[in-house]
Image: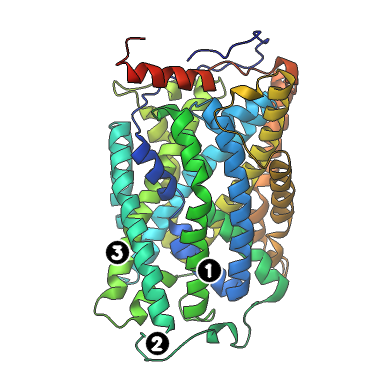
Amino acid sequence: MSAPMGKKAHIDYAPTTDRLRRSLSARQVQMIAIGGTIGTGLFLGTGKSLATGGPASLLIAYLIVGGIVFLTMLSLGEMAAFIPVAGSFCTFAGRFVDDAFGFALTWNYWFNDAVSVATDLVALQILLQYWTDNFPGWAISLIFWVVLIAANIVTVAVYGELEYWLSLLKVVTIIIFMILGIVVNCGGNTDHHYIGGENWRIPGAPFHDGIGGFASVFVTAAFAYGGTESIAITAGETKNPAKNLPRVVKNVFWRILIFFIISVILIGLDIPYNYPRLSSKTVATSPFTLVFKKTGAAGAGSFMNAVIMTSVLSAGNHALFAGARLLYSLAAQGHAPKVFARLNRKQVPWIAVLTTSIVSVVCFGSSYIGAGQLWNWLQNLVGVSNMLCWTAIGITSVRFRAAMEAQHKTHLLPFKNWTYPYGPWLCIVLNIILILVQGWSCFSPEFDAVSFVSYYVELPLMLVMYVGWKVWKKTKVVKLERMDLETDTQSVDEVVLQKFRNQIGGKA
């Protein structure tokens, strides 16, 4: 990478992490962005949200969190297009705010991705229960666990191609679901009955369990949207990131609107919040499967359940990929043992892949706890971690743009966040509020200690990591005029130059 033009600033923080192979095409990056979002959170999490909060709480919470994610992606896209490195927003946090901040955020998000893999493996067990309770759940988790490791350790091209086709299947399935959801609501169901808005008027709806139920939906919504931001982690292995990443970011809003909002509207209309097996400590059923089943077509429910299982594989694949790249980034920056930065001949951080996958063995504990209960706890952990991450991205974005202006380099940005400065600040404030209130249900009607831990344990852990690293390494908040805005950058001028080189066959 070449540095932007202008006077060279003093570098406080300059990790060299750009050694990964740029093998992901624009086609794959676009589809990975979708695949990283659509997973167990949408297919299974919406069931829990509907059961705990009712249809109105489900819709409003998903609208609010969707808006937060959109603002977050605009902020992140601006930084990732300019500095496309592995680790992305976690690297930016240390580079633009404080090394201790980056250390705490990266370890938190690595844990997030590792737990997400476990969450997806537990979800497989839940989905399997739709057909039978006799097959051991740990066996299906073990099979898919091996498949995920193999897909991520061979080469990034294999990961990208697998994720492309699995994500394409999810997109087609969502479109079919939307069509069938409308048909079912209009009377094309087993009862031949027009449903309309009946499920919003049953006793207890639309806001089930009042403020407690409404607040509890936010963490499941955050879990569902989680993964959208991790598309920027692929920046280190993306061809022409300054061009492709902004394109991905600009399409986020429409993905959120189509795949999430329309889906939760149809779920709230077609499925009553008190539907049996929608969400419990032992089992959970996808509302998507229930809608397909309501059509009355032979095997429709089984078909949808099978497709959801492939989406779970896709989500786990994406989480393992992102987690491994974060662990690689930690090692490259001196925040973890250097062995995790070791690459194989295909330039894949294979030790980081294996280490990240090991955390997912907690999924085998579902045999003793109950798959539904374990999945709920893991979902809470990941959901809160996502909100902490979005808050950190907002803080980092504010610092980044302030430094760009202080060093007179704003004109070099390939993509500008048009909501700055209001967007990042709104993202910060809303996330802090949601983090504090999302565990309301664990206090009422009686205190639930285990749920309390799953909702709030991330807060002290991240604080301890931040303070501990800051005290040990004596780190300081990076001054705006000394911030490194040159290492691994892709400026507007460089993009234009590369386009010129491509036009003349690389002779320039």
Camera-side residue of 460 and 192 = 192
- Residue highlighted by disc 1: 48
Q: Is residue 381 left or right of residue 403?
A: left
| Residue at 39% across, 81% down | 184
What is the three-letter code of the residue carrying label 2? Gly
Inter-mark Cα distance, 2 to 3: 25 Å
| Residue at 47% across, 60% down | 258
Marked residue nearer the N-terminal end (2 or 3): 2
- Residue highlighted by disc 2: 187
Residue 141: x %, y % from top left: 34, 54
Say above or below: 303 vs 488. below
- Residue highlighted by disc 3: 306
Which of the 4 image quadrants contains residue 244?
A: top left
Q: Is residue 330 left or right of residue 165?
A: right
Inter-mark Cα distance, 3 to 1: 20 Å
Residue 58 marker: none
